[in-house]
Image: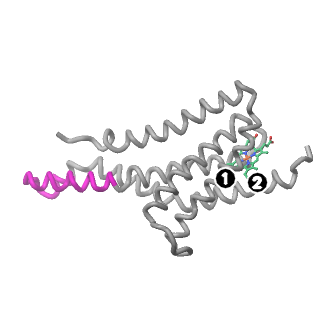
Amino acid sequence: MKISLWRKHVLPFALLLGLLVAITLAGDYALHRFNLVWVGRYLGIPGTLLIIGSLVYSMRKRKYITAGDPKSLLQFHEFTAWLGSLMVLLHAGVHFNALLPWLATAAMAVNVVSGMVGKLLLDRSRRHVQGQREQFQLRGLSKPEVEQAVFWDAVTVEAMTQWRKVHIPIFIVFALLALGHILSIFLFWGWR
Ligand code: HEM
């Protein structure tokens, strides 16, 4: 039986993303409900530190540092970036005063999603489509027939490849916007 790409790969991805959204909403509700909005304000700092910590993997990958097992560092990258983003989302809360930090948050969201696409969907989905192709070939289908059979799954994988390419450019946008927000906060700290 053909297990669809959707159920096997897209669903776990949607669940992990849904978890991020659900914890953000529930956490934001709790912070407001128990008058702890100030905690959320401070969560910006550990959130940012976690995201900066997650870059150890990027430095290892580009050989700026040579110590550390790349595979464990990748897991560390995924975990700290996810948790840091969650903290920053709680930090952003539902307050709308300034545009810059919201642009930074939007860029961060695209960043997290693109990372999760790369991690949870792309490689496994590629293998899934390749496996399907091989199965159809074994059953004796001609090449055009095989391509037709895997057409929509292949299109989905192609779309994900585009997402993956966004990960680093959008990170740079995110970092600049976040830096602008953080600098302006520290420049005007205590002035209001
Ligand atoms: C060292 C790290 C950070 C510090 C110290 C910090 C500090 C603050 C403070 C004090 C506020 C309240 C500003 C106000 O009431 O007008 C704020 C709001 C906010 N911050 Fe941060 N922040 C940090 C990191 C981040 C990052 C990385 C993002 C997004 C990617 C972010 C997104 C936001 C958003 C969306 C708001 C709400 C803005 C609004 O009220 O319209 N922050 N931050």
Q: Which residue is mark 1?
A: 48
117 vs 90, left or right, is: left
Colouring used for the render:
one colour
Q: Amino acid at mark 2?
A: Ile
Q: Describe the element under mark 1 as helix, strand or loop.
A: helix
Q: Are marks 2 and 1 in contact (CB under 8 Å)?
A: yes
Q: Specify the farthest residue to the left.
A: 140
Q: Residue at x 24, y 50 (%)?
A: 150
Q: Residue at x 53, y 66 (%)?
A: 58
Residue 102 percent across, percent down from the top left? 69, 45
Residue 57 percent across, percent down from the top left? 52, 64
Q: Specify the farthest residue to the top.
A: 33
Q: Specify the farthest residue to the right.
A: 191
Residue 2 percent across, percent down from the top left? 20, 41
The image quadrant where one finds the N terminus is top left
Q: Residue at x 92, y 47 (%)?
A: 191
**Magenta stretch?**
124-147
Q: Which marked residue is nearer to the observer: mark 2 or mark 1?
A: 1
Q: Nearer the viewer, residue 36 or 113?
A: 36
Q: Earlier in the sequence, mark 2 or mark 1?
A: 1
Q: Describe the element under mark 2 as helix, strand or loop.
A: helix
| In the image, the residue with mark 1 has its CB under 8 Å from the nearest atom of ligand 1 | yes
Q: Residue at x 57, y 46 (%)?
A: 83
Q: Amino acid at mark 1?
A: Thr
| In the image, the residue with mark 2 has its CB under 8 Å from the nearest atom of ligand 1 | yes
Q: Which residue is mark 2?
A: 182
* Mark 2 → mark 1, Cα distance in angstroms: 10 Å
Residue 13: quadrant of the picture:
top left
